Image (spheres, grey):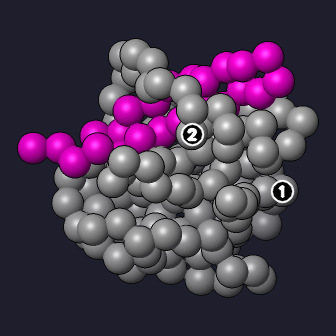
C-alpha cells in the first residue's frame, strides 16, 4: 500500500483549495529583486502548520519537513509529514499501527469551500505550475486540524488530522 508523496524544492509547502490556487503568487513579483508577497507571507507563519488568507479564502502553510502526503484513516483526512525513516513502509507501518497520541496544544481552524486541496511548493505561482499538484478531495466545511508526532525506532512522522469542527 503506497501513497503519493510530494517533495518540493523549498522547505515550505502550500496546501490550497483548488478554487484559490490561481490567487497564490508564490515568490513571483512585479519588482525585480523583491520576493513575491505570498512567499513572504508564508515565511512569516509560525509553527509546523499555520493557516493563511489566500484570495477570498484560506490555505495552509507547512514549514520544515516538506515531504508530505495525503491519506485517509478512520474517515478523516490526514496529512503526513516524513521526518525520518529508512523507507515508506516504515512510515506507513508507524501511521497504521500507532495509537493517536495527545495532540499538540495548537489546533488550526480551517474553512474549506469543498473540492480538491492542492499541495504545491510555496515558492511557485499557482497559476503557472510546471507540474501537477498533489491533490485530494475534501468536503466543504469547517475543520479543526490536530497535529501530533509519531516515533518508532526506525521512523518519525508528523501527522495533521482534519477533524470536522462544529
Magenta highlight on residue 43: no
Measure the alpha-carbon separation of dots 1 and 2. 28 Å
Check the picture and name the quadrant holding the C terminus. top left
The image quarter containing residue 158 is top right
> Which residue has dot 2 on it?
96
Mark 1 surroundings within 10 Å by alpha-carbon count, few (fewer than 14), some (14 through 19), many (20 or more): few
Residue 109 higher or lower than 139, as above or below: above
Kind of element beneath mark 2: helix
Residue 84 higher or lower than 135, as above or below: above
Q: Is residue 22 left or right of residue 94?
A: left
Residue at point 46%, 55% (across, down): 72
Residue at point 69%, 80% (across, down): 132
Check the picture and name the quadrant holding the N terminus. bottom right
- Camera-nearest label, 1 or 2: 2
> Which residue has dot 1 on it?
9
Residue at point 17%, 44% (across, down): 165
Q: Is residue 77 left or right of residue 62?
A: left
Predominant secondary structure, magenta span: strand
Using the image as rendered, state which of residue 55 and residue 18 is in the foreground.
18
Residue 42 higher or lower than 139, as above or below: above
Stretch in magenta:
144-166
Could you say where residue 98 lies in the image, as x and y percent from the top left?
Answer: 55, 27
Mark 2 surroundings within 10 Å by alpha-carbon count, few (fewer than 14), some (14 through 19), many (20 or more): few
Name the residue furthest left. Answer: 166
The image quarter containing residue 135 is bottom right
Amino acid at each position: 500500500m503506497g501513497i503519493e508523496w510530494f517533495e518540493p524544492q523549498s522547505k515550505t509547502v502550500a496546501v490550497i483549495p483548488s478554487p484559490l490556487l490561481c490567487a497564490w503568487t508564490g515568490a513571483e513579483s512585479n519588482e525585480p529583486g523583491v520576493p513575491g508577497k505570498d512567499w513572504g507571507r508564508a515565511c512569516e507563519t509560525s509553527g509546523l502548520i499555520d493557516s493563511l488568507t489566500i484570495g477570498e479564502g484560506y490555505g495552509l502553510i507547512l514549514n520544515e519537513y516538506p515531504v508530505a502526503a495525503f491519506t485517509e484513516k478512520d474517515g478523516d483526512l490526514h496529512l503526513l509529514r516524513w521526518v525520518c525513516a529508512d523507507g515508506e513502509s516504515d512510515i506507513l507501518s508507524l501511521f497504521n499501527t500507532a495509537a493517536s497520541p495527545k495532540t499538540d496544544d495548537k489546533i488550526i481552524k480551517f474553512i474549506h469551500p469543498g473540492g480538491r486541496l492542492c499541495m504545491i511548493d510555496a515558492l511557485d505561482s499557482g497559476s503557472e505550475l510546471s507540474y501537477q499538484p498533489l491533490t485530494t478531495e475534501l468536503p466543504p466545511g469547517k475543520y479543526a486540524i490536530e497535529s501530533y508526532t509519531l516515533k518508532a525506532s526506525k521512523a518519525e512522522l508528523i501527522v495533521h488530522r482534519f477533524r470536522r469542527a462544529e
